[in-house]
Amino acid sequence: MRSKIDPGGQSDAGKGKSESQEPERSFIEKARRAQIIDAAVETIAARGFAKASLAQIAERAGISKGVISYHFAGKSELIERLVEQVYEGIGAFVGARLDGQSGGAVWLRVYIESVAEYMLGHQTQLAALGEIFSHFRTADGAPRYGIASSEPIYVALEKVFLEGQQSGEFRAFDVRVMAVSLQAGIDNMFAYWSAHPEHDLTAYARELAGIFEHATRADSRARD
Amino acid sequence: MRSKIDPGGQSDAGKGKSESQEPERSFIEKARRAQIIDAAVETIAARGFAKASLAQIAERAGISKGVISYHFAGKSELIERLVEQVYEGIGAFVGARLDGQSGGAVWLRVYIESVAEYMLGHQTQLAALGEIFSHFRTADGAPRYGIASSEPIYVALEKVFLEGQQSGEFRAFDVRVMAVSLQAGIDNMFAYWSAHPEHDLTAYARELAGIFEHATRADSRARD
DNA sequence: TCAATTTTTGACCGCATGGCCAAAATTTTA
DNA sequence: TAAAATTTTGGCCATGCGGTCAAAAATTGA
Protein backbone atom coordinates (compact mmCIF):
# COMPACT_ATOMS: atom_id res chain seq x y z
CA MET A 1 0.00 0.00 0.00
CA ARG A 2 1.01 3.51 -0.62
CA SER A 3 1.49 6.01 2.11
CA LYS A 4 -1.32 8.48 2.59
CA ILE A 5 1.21 11.29 2.79
CA ASP A 6 1.86 11.41 -0.92
CA PRO A 7 0.49 8.80 -3.27
CA GLY A 8 2.67 8.34 -6.34
CA GLY A 9 6.05 8.66 -4.68
CA GLN A 10 6.77 10.77 -1.65
CA SER A 11 7.78 13.69 -3.75
CA ASP A 12 8.03 17.35 -3.06
CA ALA A 13 7.76 18.20 -6.68
CA GLY A 14 5.67 20.53 -8.73
CA LYS A 15 1.98 21.03 -8.57
CA GLY A 16 1.77 21.39 -4.77
CA LYS A 17 0.49 24.31 -2.81
CA SER A 18 1.80 27.77 -3.60
CA GLU A 19 4.15 27.67 -0.63
CA SER A 20 6.91 25.16 -1.33
CA GLN A 21 6.88 23.91 2.22
CA GLU A 22 8.76 20.70 2.94
CA PRO A 23 6.42 17.81 3.49
CA GLU A 24 6.95 16.43 6.99
CA ARG A 25 9.17 13.40 6.84
CA SER A 26 9.69 10.82 9.52
CA PHE A 27 13.17 10.14 10.84
CA ILE A 28 13.31 6.89 8.90
CA GLU A 29 12.10 8.60 5.78
CA LYS A 30 14.86 11.22 5.91
CA ALA A 31 17.50 8.60 6.65
CA ARG A 32 16.42 6.49 3.70
CA ARG A 33 16.44 9.43 1.34
CA ALA A 34 19.92 10.40 2.52
CA GLN A 35 21.13 6.84 2.16
CA ILE A 36 19.76 6.57 -1.37
CA ILE A 37 21.29 9.90 -2.38
CA ASP A 38 24.65 8.80 -1.01
CA ALA A 39 24.46 5.57 -2.97
CA ALA A 40 23.54 7.51 -6.09
CA VAL A 41 26.56 9.81 -5.65
CA GLU A 42 28.89 6.85 -5.31
CA THR A 43 27.39 4.95 -8.20
CA ILE A 44 27.40 7.89 -10.59
CA ALA A 45 30.95 8.85 -9.65
CA ALA A 46 32.21 5.30 -10.00
CA ARG A 47 30.39 4.06 -13.08
CA GLY A 48 29.26 7.21 -14.85
CA PHE A 49 25.78 8.64 -15.22
CA ALA A 50 24.74 6.43 -18.12
CA LYS A 51 25.43 3.21 -16.21
CA ALA A 52 24.03 4.41 -12.91
CA SER A 53 20.66 2.70 -13.16
CA LEU A 54 18.18 2.49 -10.32
CA ALA A 55 19.11 -1.18 -10.02
CA GLN A 56 22.81 -0.30 -9.61
CA ILE A 57 22.07 2.40 -7.06
CA ALA A 58 19.79 0.09 -5.10
CA GLU A 59 22.39 -2.65 -5.09
CA ARG A 60 25.02 -0.28 -3.72
CA ALA A 61 22.61 0.87 -1.03
CA GLY A 62 21.80 -2.74 -0.19
CA ILE A 63 18.08 -2.31 -0.79
CA SER A 64 15.51 -3.34 -3.33
CA LYS A 65 14.95 -1.21 -6.40
CA GLY A 66 11.35 -0.53 -5.49
CA VAL A 67 12.42 1.34 -2.36
CA ILE A 68 13.83 4.12 -4.48
CA SER A 69 10.55 4.47 -6.33
CA TYR A 70 8.75 4.52 -3.02
CA HIS A 71 10.81 7.37 -1.56
CA PHE A 72 11.31 9.41 -4.72
CA ALA A 73 8.80 10.27 -7.41
CA GLY A 74 11.26 9.05 -10.03
CA LYS A 75 14.89 9.03 -11.02
CA SER A 76 14.68 12.71 -11.96
CA GLU A 77 13.60 13.73 -8.49
CA LEU A 78 16.42 11.72 -6.95
CA ILE A 79 19.01 13.41 -9.16
CA GLU A 80 17.61 16.86 -8.50
CA ARG A 81 17.69 16.37 -4.70
CA LEU A 82 21.26 15.12 -5.08
CA VAL A 83 22.30 18.22 -6.99
CA GLU A 84 20.63 20.49 -4.45
CA GLN A 85 22.47 18.80 -1.62
CA VAL A 86 25.89 19.05 -3.24
CA TYR A 87 25.27 22.65 -4.21
CA GLU A 88 24.34 23.59 -0.68
CA GLY A 89 27.52 22.01 0.65
CA ILE A 90 29.90 23.81 -1.64
CA GLY A 91 27.99 27.06 -1.39
CA ALA A 92 28.15 27.07 2.38
CA PHE A 93 31.85 26.26 2.45
CA VAL A 94 33.00 28.77 -0.12
CA GLY A 95 30.55 31.38 1.12
CA ALA A 96 32.02 31.20 4.60
CA ARG A 97 35.54 31.67 3.26
CA LEU A 98 34.51 34.62 1.13
CA ASP A 99 32.49 36.33 3.82
CA GLY A 100 34.01 39.64 4.74
CA GLN A 101 36.75 39.52 2.11
CA SER A 102 37.31 42.86 0.49
CA GLY A 103 39.33 43.77 -2.55
CA GLY A 104 38.80 42.15 -5.90
CA ALA A 105 42.15 40.40 -6.25
CA VAL A 106 42.02 38.97 -2.74
CA TRP A 107 38.42 37.87 -3.23
CA LEU A 108 39.33 36.12 -6.46
CA ARG A 109 42.21 34.21 -4.93
CA VAL A 110 40.16 33.15 -1.91
CA TYR A 111 37.38 32.05 -4.22
CA ILE A 112 39.59 29.88 -6.40
CA GLU A 113 41.58 28.39 -3.55
CA SER A 114 38.60 27.66 -1.34
CA VAL A 115 36.83 25.84 -4.16
CA ALA A 116 39.98 23.77 -4.59
CA GLU A 117 40.08 23.04 -0.89
CA TYR A 118 36.49 21.85 -1.05
CA MET A 119 37.34 19.63 -4.00
CA LEU A 120 40.04 17.94 -1.92
CA GLY A 121 37.49 16.75 0.60
CA HIS A 122 34.57 16.02 -1.69
CA GLN A 123 35.97 14.42 -4.79
CA THR A 124 33.22 11.84 -5.17
CA GLN A 125 30.38 14.34 -4.81
CA LEU A 126 31.90 16.65 -7.39
CA ALA A 127 32.65 13.85 -9.83
CA ALA A 128 29.00 12.84 -9.65
CA LEU A 129 27.93 16.44 -10.11
CA GLY A 130 30.05 16.72 -13.24
CA GLU A 131 28.53 13.58 -14.69
CA ILE A 132 25.04 14.84 -13.97
CA PHE A 133 25.73 18.24 -15.52
CA SER A 134 26.88 16.77 -18.79
CA HIS A 135 24.42 13.86 -19.01
CA PHE A 136 21.16 14.61 -17.26
CA ARG A 137 18.39 15.76 -19.57
CA THR A 138 14.77 16.70 -19.12
CA ALA A 139 11.99 14.56 -20.56
CA ASP A 140 12.02 16.59 -23.78
CA GLY A 141 15.71 15.90 -24.34
CA ALA A 142 17.13 19.29 -23.37
CA PRO A 143 20.06 19.45 -20.93
CA ARG A 144 18.71 19.84 -17.41
CA TYR A 145 21.81 21.58 -16.06
CA GLY A 146 23.53 23.25 -18.94
CA ILE A 147 25.71 26.31 -19.13
CA ALA A 148 22.57 28.31 -18.46
CA SER A 149 22.47 26.97 -14.90
CA SER A 150 25.83 28.62 -14.23
CA GLU A 151 24.23 32.00 -14.81
CA PRO A 152 23.98 32.91 -11.09
CA ILE A 153 27.70 32.26 -10.69
CA TYR A 154 28.51 34.37 -13.72
CA VAL A 155 26.41 37.22 -12.38
CA ALA A 156 28.13 37.07 -9.00
CA LEU A 157 31.58 37.08 -10.60
CA GLU A 158 30.63 39.95 -12.89
CA LYS A 159 29.67 41.99 -9.86
CA VAL A 160 33.09 41.48 -8.31
CA PHE A 161 34.81 42.35 -11.58
CA LEU A 162 32.75 45.51 -12.06
CA GLU A 163 33.54 46.74 -8.58
CA GLY A 164 37.23 46.11 -9.14
CA GLN A 165 37.13 48.01 -12.40
CA GLN A 166 35.37 50.95 -10.79
CA SER A 167 37.91 51.10 -8.00
CA GLY A 168 40.75 51.01 -10.53
CA GLU A 169 42.09 47.73 -9.19
CA PHE A 170 41.14 45.87 -12.38
CA ARG A 171 41.77 46.81 -15.97
CA ALA A 172 38.98 47.22 -18.51
CA PHE A 173 37.81 43.88 -19.84
CA ASP A 174 34.57 42.17 -20.78
CA VAL A 175 33.28 40.93 -17.43
CA ARG A 176 31.09 38.23 -18.97
CA VAL A 177 33.93 36.59 -20.88
CA MET A 178 36.16 36.85 -17.82
CA ALA A 179 33.50 35.26 -15.61
CA VAL A 180 32.86 32.41 -18.03
CA SER A 181 36.57 31.79 -18.50
CA LEU A 182 37.32 31.79 -14.79
CA GLN A 183 34.56 29.32 -14.05
CA ALA A 184 35.77 27.17 -16.95
CA GLY A 185 39.26 27.22 -15.48
CA ILE A 186 37.96 26.12 -12.08
CA ASP A 187 35.76 23.36 -13.47
CA ASN A 188 38.60 22.09 -15.59
CA MET A 189 40.95 22.18 -12.62
CA PHE A 190 38.79 19.52 -11.02
CA ALA A 191 38.55 17.46 -14.20
CA TYR A 192 42.31 17.61 -14.69
CA TRP A 193 42.97 16.65 -11.09
CA SER A 194 40.53 13.74 -11.37
CA ALA A 195 42.48 12.43 -14.36
CA HIS A 196 45.85 13.20 -12.73
CA PRO A 197 45.40 12.68 -9.00
CA GLU A 198 49.14 12.92 -8.48
CA HIS A 199 49.03 16.57 -9.47
CA ASP A 200 49.11 18.90 -6.44
CA LEU A 201 45.64 20.47 -6.47
CA THR A 202 46.56 23.21 -4.01
CA ALA A 203 49.51 24.28 -6.13
CA TYR A 204 47.29 24.16 -9.22
CA ALA A 205 44.79 26.49 -7.53
CA ARG A 206 47.55 28.93 -6.54
CA GLU A 207 48.77 28.98 -10.12
CA LEU A 208 45.26 29.42 -11.52
CA ALA A 209 44.70 32.32 -9.14
CA GLY A 210 47.93 33.84 -10.45
CA ILE A 211 46.71 33.55 -14.02
CA PHE A 212 43.53 35.47 -13.29
CA GLU A 213 45.32 37.94 -11.07
CA HIS A 214 47.49 38.90 -14.03
CA ALA A 215 44.56 38.73 -16.41
CA THR A 216 42.44 41.15 -14.40
CA ARG A 217 44.76 43.65 -12.77
CA ALA A 218 45.16 47.16 -14.05
CA ASP A 219 47.83 47.44 -16.73
CA SER A 220 50.03 50.18 -15.36
CA ARG A 221 50.68 48.51 -12.06
CA ALA A 222 54.14 47.16 -11.30
CA ARG A 223 54.60 43.64 -10.07
CA ASP A 224 53.91 43.09 -6.39
CA MET B 1 26.26 -12.29 -47.63
CA ARG B 2 29.27 -10.63 -46.18
CA SER B 3 31.95 -9.08 -48.28
CA LYS B 4 35.15 -11.06 -48.64
CA ILE B 5 37.16 -7.96 -47.86
CA ASP B 6 36.45 -8.02 -44.18
CA PRO B 7 33.99 -10.41 -42.64
CA GLY B 8 32.44 -9.00 -39.51
CA GLY B 9 32.06 -5.43 -40.64
CA GLN B 10 34.36 -3.63 -43.04
CA SER B 11 36.51 -2.38 -40.25
CA ASP B 12 40.04 -1.11 -40.17
CA ALA B 13 40.34 -1.85 -36.49
CA GLY B 14 42.86 -3.66 -34.39
CA LYS B 15 44.38 -7.04 -35.00
CA GLY B 16 45.30 -6.45 -38.64
CA LYS B 17 48.75 -6.54 -40.17
CA SER B 18 51.57 -4.61 -38.54
CA GLU B 19 51.25 -1.83 -41.10
CA SER B 20 47.99 0.05 -40.49
CA GLN B 21 47.34 0.39 -44.19
CA GLU B 22 43.90 1.54 -45.25
CA PRO B 23 41.85 -1.26 -46.70
CA GLU B 24 40.97 -0.39 -50.28
CA ARG B 25 37.44 0.92 -50.46
CA SER B 26 35.30 1.29 -53.51
CA PHE B 27 33.86 4.64 -54.45
CA ILE B 28 30.44 3.56 -53.22
CA GLU B 29 31.91 2.26 -50.02
CA LYS B 30 33.60 5.57 -49.22
CA ALA B 31 30.50 7.54 -50.12
CA ARG B 32 28.33 5.42 -47.84
CA ARG B 33 30.73 5.75 -44.96
CA ALA B 34 30.87 9.51 -45.42
CA GLN B 35 27.09 9.69 -45.63
CA ILE B 36 26.69 7.67 -42.45
CA ILE B 37 29.26 9.74 -40.59
CA ASP B 38 27.49 12.93 -41.66
CA ALA B 39 24.17 11.56 -40.45
CA ALA B 40 25.79 10.59 -37.15
CA VAL B 41 27.19 14.11 -36.69
CA GLU B 42 23.79 15.66 -37.28
CA THR B 43 21.97 13.20 -35.07
CA ILE B 44 24.39 13.50 -32.16
CA ALA B 45 24.46 17.28 -32.37
CA ALA B 46 20.68 17.54 -32.55
CA ARG B 47 19.57 14.91 -30.05
CA GLY B 48 22.61 14.27 -27.86
CA PHE B 49 24.87 11.26 -27.74
CA ALA B 50 22.61 9.17 -25.52
CA LYS B 51 19.67 9.41 -27.89
CA ALA B 52 21.67 9.01 -31.08
CA SER B 53 20.93 5.33 -31.66
CA LEU B 54 21.85 3.47 -34.81
CA ALA B 55 18.16 3.50 -35.71
CA GLN B 56 18.03 7.30 -35.41
CA ILE B 57 21.20 7.75 -37.45
CA ALA B 58 19.94 5.36 -40.13
CA GLU B 59 16.62 7.16 -40.32
CA ARG B 60 18.37 10.51 -40.81
CA ALA B 61 20.53 9.01 -43.52
CA GLY B 62 17.47 7.48 -45.19
CA ILE B 63 18.85 3.95 -45.04
CA SER B 64 18.20 0.76 -43.16
CA LYS B 65 19.88 0.18 -39.82
CA GLY B 66 21.70 -2.88 -41.05
CA VAL B 67 23.66 -0.82 -43.56
CA ILE B 68 25.57 0.81 -40.74
CA SER B 69 26.50 -2.56 -39.31
CA TYR B 70 27.62 -3.64 -42.75
CA HIS B 71 29.94 -0.69 -43.33
CA PHE B 72 31.23 -0.29 -39.78
CA ALA B 73 32.33 -2.98 -37.37
CA GLY B 74 30.04 -1.45 -34.74
CA LYS B 75 28.87 1.80 -33.28
CA SER B 76 32.28 2.34 -31.68
CA GLU B 77 34.08 2.23 -34.98
CA LEU B 78 31.62 4.70 -36.48
CA ILE B 79 32.18 7.15 -33.64
CA GLU B 80 35.95 6.81 -33.81
CA ARG B 81 36.03 7.49 -37.55
CA LEU B 82 33.78 10.51 -36.95
CA VAL B 83 36.16 11.90 -34.34
CA GLU B 84 39.16 11.36 -36.61
CA GLN B 85 37.45 13.22 -39.41
CA VAL B 86 36.49 16.22 -37.30
CA TYR B 87 39.94 16.35 -35.76
CA GLU B 88 41.61 16.37 -39.15
CA GLY B 89 39.42 19.24 -40.27
CA ILE B 90 40.11 21.54 -37.38
CA GLY B 91 43.77 20.56 -37.27
CA ALA B 92 44.30 21.42 -40.91
CA PHE B 93 42.49 24.75 -40.60
CA VAL B 94 44.19 25.97 -37.45
CA GLY B 95 47.53 24.55 -38.50
CA ALA B 96 47.46 26.55 -41.70
CA ARG B 97 46.71 29.75 -39.80
CA LEU B 98 49.51 29.11 -37.32
CA ASP B 99 52.08 28.12 -39.91
CA GLY B 100 54.93 30.59 -39.94
CA GLN B 101 53.65 32.65 -37.02
CA SER B 102 56.45 33.73 -34.73
CA GLY B 103 56.30 35.26 -31.30
CA GLY B 104 54.42 33.72 -28.43
CA ALA B 105 51.77 36.41 -27.97
CA VAL B 106 50.96 36.58 -31.66
CA TRP B 107 50.84 32.80 -31.92
CA LEU B 108 48.47 32.61 -28.98
CA ARG B 109 46.08 35.16 -30.43
CA VAL B 110 46.07 33.53 -33.84
CA TYR B 111 45.47 30.17 -32.23
CA ILE B 112 42.48 31.33 -30.21
CA GLU B 113 40.93 33.39 -32.97
CA SER B 114 41.39 30.80 -35.69
CA VAL B 115 39.75 28.14 -33.54
CA ALA B 116 36.84 30.52 -33.07
CA GLU B 117 36.68 31.14 -36.78
CA TYR B 118 36.51 27.40 -37.39
CA MET B 119 33.72 27.11 -34.82
CA LEU B 120 31.68 29.64 -36.77
CA GLY B 121 31.63 27.40 -39.82
CA HIS B 122 31.43 24.00 -38.17
CA GLN B 123 29.05 24.36 -35.25
CA THR B 124 27.31 21.02 -35.80
CA GLN B 125 30.53 19.04 -36.06
CA LEU B 126 31.93 20.55 -32.89
CA ALA B 127 28.70 20.10 -30.96
CA ALA B 128 28.77 16.41 -31.86
CA LEU B 129 32.43 16.22 -30.86
CA GLY B 130 31.65 17.70 -27.47
CA GLU B 131 28.86 15.20 -26.89
CA ILE B 132 31.13 12.34 -27.84
CA PHE B 133 33.93 13.53 -25.58
CA SER B 134 31.75 13.62 -22.53
CA HIS B 135 29.64 10.54 -23.24
CA PHE B 136 31.51 7.98 -25.26
CA ARG B 137 33.02 5.17 -23.20
CA THR B 138 35.00 2.06 -23.98
CA ALA B 139 33.51 -1.39 -23.41
CA ASP B 140 34.95 -1.49 -19.90
CA GLY B 141 33.19 1.74 -18.95
CA ALA B 142 36.17 4.09 -19.01
CA PRO B 143 35.87 7.40 -20.91
CA ARG B 144 37.15 6.89 -24.46
CA TYR B 145 38.14 10.51 -24.96
CA GLY B 146 38.85 12.01 -21.58
CA ILE B 147 41.10 14.81 -20.52
CA ALA B 148 43.98 12.47 -21.24
CA SER B 149 43.25 12.72 -24.96
CA SER B 150 43.98 16.45 -24.81
CA GLU B 151 47.54 15.67 -23.85
CA PRO B 152 49.02 16.36 -27.31
CA ILE B 153 47.42 19.81 -27.30
CA TYR B 154 48.75 20.52 -23.83
CA VAL B 155 52.25 19.50 -24.90
CA ALA B 156 52.12 21.74 -27.95
CA LEU B 157 50.93 24.70 -25.91
CA GLU B 158 53.59 24.08 -23.27
CA LYS B 159 56.23 24.25 -25.97
CA VAL B 160 55.02 27.68 -27.06
CA PHE B 161 54.89 28.90 -23.48
CA LEU B 162 58.38 27.65 -22.70
CA GLU B 163 59.85 29.38 -25.73
CA GLY B 164 58.13 32.60 -24.77
CA GLN B 165 59.50 32.36 -21.27
CA GLN B 166 63.01 31.74 -22.52
CA SER B 167 62.84 34.72 -24.83
CA GLY B 168 61.60 36.91 -21.99
CA GLU B 169 58.30 37.62 -23.73
CA PHE B 170 56.35 35.63 -21.12
CA ARG B 171 56.55 35.79 -17.35
CA ALA B 172 57.36 32.76 -15.22
CA PHE B 173 54.30 30.56 -14.74
CA ASP B 174 53.46 26.88 -14.64
CA VAL B 175 53.13 25.98 -18.30
CA ARG B 176 50.95 22.95 -17.63
CA VAL B 177 48.33 24.87 -15.69
CA MET B 178 48.39 27.63 -18.29
CA ALA B 179 47.94 25.12 -21.12
CA VAL B 180 45.07 23.34 -19.41
CA SER B 181 43.37 26.63 -18.54
CA LEU B 182 43.70 28.05 -22.02
CA GLN B 183 42.24 24.96 -23.61
CA ALA B 184 39.44 25.01 -21.03
CA GLY B 185 38.72 28.62 -21.93
CA ILE B 186 38.55 27.76 -25.63
CA ASP B 187 36.33 24.72 -25.13
CA ASN B 188 34.02 26.70 -22.91
CA MET B 189 33.88 29.51 -25.44
CA PHE B 190 32.20 27.09 -27.81
CA ALA B 191 29.85 25.75 -25.14
CA TYR B 192 28.87 29.27 -24.11
CA TRP B 193 28.31 30.35 -27.68
CA SER B 194 26.17 27.26 -28.33
CA ALA B 195 23.96 28.21 -25.40
CA HIS B 196 23.98 31.91 -26.34
CA PRO B 197 24.16 32.07 -30.14
CA GLU B 198 23.42 35.76 -30.03
CA HIS B 199 26.77 36.38 -28.40
CA ASP B 200 29.41 37.61 -30.88
CA LEU B 201 31.85 34.71 -31.05
CA THR B 202 34.55 36.73 -32.78
CA ALA B 203 34.44 39.39 -30.09
CA TYR B 204 34.50 36.67 -27.45
CA ALA B 205 37.64 35.20 -28.99
CA ARG B 206 39.34 38.60 -29.09
CA GLU B 207 38.53 39.10 -25.44
CA LEU B 208 39.72 35.61 -24.50
CA ALA B 209 42.97 36.26 -26.34
CA GLY B 210 43.33 39.46 -24.31
CA ILE B 211 42.87 37.54 -21.08
CA PHE B 212 45.68 35.14 -21.89
CA GLU B 213 47.84 37.88 -23.31
CA HIS B 214 47.74 39.61 -19.94
CA ALA B 215 48.05 36.34 -18.07
CA THR B 216 51.21 35.31 -19.88
CA ARG B 217 53.17 38.46 -20.65
CA ALA B 218 56.21 39.49 -18.68
CA ASP B 219 55.29 41.60 -15.66
CA SER B 220 57.41 44.66 -16.22
CA ARG B 221 56.07 45.44 -19.65
CA ALA B 222 53.89 48.50 -20.15
CA ARG B 223 50.61 48.27 -21.99
CA ASP B 224 50.81 48.22 -25.74
C1' DT C 1 -2.48 -8.26 21.81
C1' DC C 2 -3.88 -7.28 17.36
C1' DA C 3 -5.51 -4.38 13.81
C1' DA C 4 -4.03 -0.41 11.01
C1' DT C 5 -0.37 1.67 8.72
C1' DT C 6 4.08 2.11 6.66
C1' DT C 7 7.80 0.05 4.31
C1' DT C 8 10.06 -3.52 1.53
C1' DT C 9 10.34 -7.14 -1.70
C1' DG C 10 10.71 -9.31 -6.14
C1' DA C 11 8.32 -10.29 -10.15
C1' DC C 12 6.61 -8.18 -14.06
C1' DC C 13 5.54 -4.55 -17.88
C1' DG C 14 6.49 -2.01 -22.18
C1' DC C 15 10.13 -0.03 -24.46
C1' DA C 16 14.58 0.99 -26.69
C1' DT C 17 19.08 -0.49 -27.53
C1' DG C 18 23.21 -2.70 -30.46
C1' DG C 19 23.88 -6.42 -32.95
C1' DC C 20 22.76 -10.44 -36.06
C1' DC C 21 21.34 -12.82 -40.19
C1' DA C 22 18.70 -15.10 -44.06
C1' DA C 23 16.76 -13.51 -47.95
C1' DA C 24 16.22 -10.20 -51.51
C1' DA C 25 17.98 -6.66 -54.50
C1' DT C 26 21.60 -4.62 -56.93
C1' DT C 27 25.98 -4.22 -59.17
C1' DT C 28 30.04 -6.21 -61.18
C1' DT C 29 32.42 -9.55 -63.81
C1' DA C 30 33.15 -12.81 -67.46
C1' DT D 1 23.29 -12.57 -70.70
C1' DA D 2 24.23 -15.22 -66.74
C1' DA D 3 26.89 -16.21 -62.86
C1' DA D 4 29.23 -14.18 -58.99
C1' DA D 5 29.95 -10.76 -55.68
C1' DT D 6 28.37 -6.90 -53.18
C1' DT D 7 24.97 -4.29 -50.83
C1' DT D 8 20.48 -3.61 -48.62
C1' DT D 9 16.46 -4.90 -46.21
C1' DG D 10 13.58 -5.87 -42.31
C1' DG D 11 12.63 -8.90 -38.81
C1' DC D 12 14.59 -11.03 -34.81
C1' DC D 13 17.45 -11.57 -30.50
C1' DA D 14 19.05 -10.90 -25.67
C1' DT D 15 19.82 -7.27 -22.60
C1' DG D 16 18.93 -3.53 -19.58
C1' DC D 17 16.15 0.34 -18.60
C1' DG D 18 12.49 3.10 -15.45
C1' DG D 19 8.49 2.23 -13.51
C1' DT D 20 4.39 -0.48 -11.35
C1' DC D 21 2.19 -3.52 -8.31
C1' DA D 22 0.27 -7.27 -5.26
C1' DA D 23 1.82 -9.43 -1.53
C1' DA D 24 4.72 -9.87 2.42
C1' DA D 25 7.14 -7.89 6.24
C1' DA D 26 7.88 -4.57 9.71
C1' DT D 27 6.38 -0.94 12.52
C1' DT D 28 3.08 1.71 15.07
C1' DG D 29 -0.81 2.72 18.03
C1' DA D 30 -4.86 1.68 20.80
Image (cartoon, coloured by chain):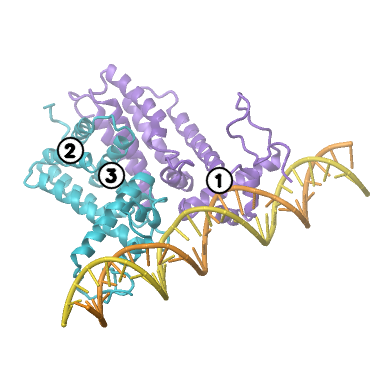
Chain colours: A cyan, B purple, C orange, D yellow
Earlier along the polypeptide chain: callout 2 or callout 3?
2
Q: Is residue A59 left or right of residue A84?
A: right
Specify the label residue A124 is tagged with: 3
Residue A81, position as x, y percentages in the image: 27, 59
Question: Which class describes the residues within 10 Å of circle 3: few (<14), some (14-19), or many (20+)?
Answer: some
**Residue for badge 1:** B75
Residue B163, position as x, y percentages in the image: 32, 19
Q: Label 3 marks which chain's residue?
A: A
Question: Which class describes the residues within 10 Å of circle 1: few (<14), some (14-19), or many (20+)?
Answer: few
Q: Label 1 marks which chain's residue?
A: B
Dots 2 and 3 on the same chain: yes
Q: Secondary structure at mark 2?
A: helix
For marks 1 and 2, give the CA distance: 42 Å
The answer to whether A164 is drawn above or below residue C16 in the figure is above
**Residue for badge 2:** A113
Question: Which class describes the residues within 10 Å of circle 2: few (<14), some (14-19), or many (20+)?
Answer: many
Q: What is the three-letter code of the residue carrying label 3? A: Thr
For marks 3 and 1, give the CA distance: 30 Å
